[in-house]
Amino acid sequence: MVELKHPVKLAIADSFLDQFGRLPKNIQSKVTSFLNRFKQNPTSSGINYETIKDCKDNRMRSVRIDLEYRAIILKPETGNLYPLLWVGKHDLAYFWAQKRVCQINQISGALQIIDTEEIQNTTERLTTQKQEKPGRFDHIKDEDLMRLGVPQMLIPALRKLVTDADVDNILSHLPQECTDRIIMLAAGYKLPEIYQFIETPKTTIDVENIETALENHDTLSRFVVITEDIELEEMLAAPLEKWRVFLHPSQRKLVERDWNGPVRVLGGAGTGKTVVALHRAKWLVHHRFNMPGDRILFTTYTRNLSIDIASSLKTIVTPEEMERIKVVNLDKWLLEFFKQQNINIKIAYDKETRPLWEKAYNKREEANLSLDFYKQEWEEIIQTNECKNLRDYLKVVRTGRGTRLNREQRQKVWKVIEEYMNLLSEEGLREPKDAMRDGIEILKQNPKGIKYQSVIVDEAQDMSKIAFELIRAIVGPAKPNDIFIVGDGHQRIYGSAVKLSQCDIDIRGRSKKLILNYRTTDENRKWATDILSPLTIDDLDGGVDNLKEYRSLLHGEKPIVKGFNSIEEEIEYILNFLREINKTEKESVTCIALRTKELIERYKEGLKELEIQEIIGEQEERGERIRIATMHRVKGLQFDHIILPSVNTDIIPFKSALERSADLTAREQFLTRERCLVHVAATRAKKQILVTYYGKPSPFLNLS
């Protein structure tokens, strides 16, 4: 075998991986064997490079996998770096190659795969339209559009765009790295505002130097350069898990850099916030906190999500690096911390506190206030403001509470609260927030005991104020790369709004946003977003967030919303819907998401002829092709299809819980969480949403 002077590098395109994932298993094995041989010596006489007739890019070559299948490669004139572009049956591979060119954008420096036929058709269609108004981007220079990632040959088409619909229609024809930039430009962002999200281009671009282009952030959103055999093996073993290797430039810009303090990343459902958090952990543990004693904490709100995150993280970091990343929900971390300190604390949740509240409520002197009022007063006023006694409570401003209380009423309310506190103490219980305060005090008294260099927080919208104060205590005083927070107030289904600056977490100048939805179709996105239309949503730091620029590049069928006279008719329709999916989509997974656990039993019984797996507790979402779960449980998961049954007026919003609201303010807060819950459930769908109801529909559906 000829020994090469320089190691061979394979630059694998996402288009190659997409096609590889669709191949039969036996052909995948042949492709893998070929690539292993190819990587040893791409100049071997056994590699049969074939020119492609009528191909617009004379560097493209076909290489034989077997008699029927071919791979498309960009053959370099010099060097040992080989881009792999596509793989499939012979005629399809040639057809794909004949329509495309690989070009380096002379302004952005990115290597782009361009479908010349599609661009020509798009340009011709737009230029034949009668244009009565100025173009949307007439004021933008060609070189500025190219810096945003627009290929030069597509600029004439962009010049013809006028309306929002025009912009939406062209997004799928653009290289993915520039779609969010064009959305922002169309929404009124200035070029300097957009440039801060992208890599500063080199002053001179060599349009022939592919090796340099493959270091560009835009290029790395669709190419991954492989030098080690193990990297190739792991990638081909899971070709559809593209998030492991490809990051959009807007994501990479957040991940691969030093930050001079805490960072907050917002983004709607499906924008890749968790992917960014995972890759941030990988980058930090590999490039910054890579000493044996360094530690990173990756935390989230629920135990289920922490298990999913740990499972994902193991696929992108080494076992040694995984040893230095602690993935755990905050309550569990706290219990482990107390155990290390030889402190015996039992944290009380609803199951433990419910009987104590009922006992304390029996001591009430204010007859007009419900038990739920006392619970909410405790949670939102007394706990949030750390009222330890009556004097503290009498002084506190009850911001956000709808029921006014005079001094005498507060004194009566405190008697119930005090009784509840005494009962907790007698049982040796601490509520989560009290336990967090205990943890903060211990950390403050022993700052040398702080062992984490960085904390990464996922699903931050559900974290409480005291939780963020604990996170600050865990990582110690502010320093570079200390806290990385991702979240979305539109998905808050627990807790209430928090202002990070009040938790000693200063994100000024380090507040970022993701706007591209990679999971669901734009039709699903619009429907799920419309559910939230009456609401004003916070940005986790006292400001307002919106989904104005939030887009999806995928398109599909509109969500189906159907009403029935009875639950029996509804279940029969769902049964037929599922039968059809099972018949036409052999690999798809559907989840039925319901508002309550009681409803799950009713629908499992009605659909018992099908094999349905309930997602409960820590169980991962693998197994049967049809799953069933509460809307709360599907948070953080994704499925091909989502079915939302019983979206009736008394179920969503949940009538019995709504009626327990202590006052108008509590009622509005509950309705907001219910809308967010439906939004979260709907945005789990990659393909199709089916919404059904019987009798009177939920007011959230806006059908009247």
Image (cartoon, helix red, strand yellow):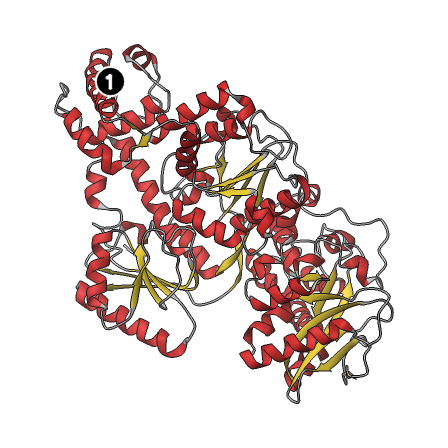
Residue in the image at 24% along x and 14% along y = 406
Q: Is 6 on the left-hand or right-hand side of 158? A: right
In this view, 637 is above or below 172: above
Q: Position of residue 344 (x, y in %)?
A: 34, 28
Nearer-the-camera pick, 63 or 527: 63
In this view, 548 is above or below 103: above
Nearer-the-camera pick, 31 or 599: 31
Residue in the image at 57% along x and 28% along y = 506
Q: Is 670 on the left-hand or right-hand side of 186? A: left
Q: Position of residue 310 (x, y in %)?
A: 49, 50
Q: Is disc 1 placed on a helix, strand or loop?
A: loop
- The residue to which callout 1 is attached is 405
Residue 374 is drawn in which quadrant? top left
Numbered marks: total? 1
Q: Position of residue 49 (x, y in %)?
A: 78, 82
Any part of residue 302 in sight: yes
In the orientation shown, which residue stands out farthest toward the bottom? 67
Q: Quadrant of the C terminus?
A: bottom left
Disc 1: CA contacts within 10 A as few (<14), some (14-19) or many (>=20): few
- The type of residue carrying mark 1 is Leu
Any part of residue 564 in sight: no
Nearer-the-camera pick, 284 or 12: 284
Q: Is 334 on the left-hand or right-hand side of 92? A: left
Q: Is 659 on the left-hand or right-hand side of 544? A: left
Q: Quadrant of the N terminus?
A: bottom right
In the orientation shown, which residue stands out farthest toward the top? 391
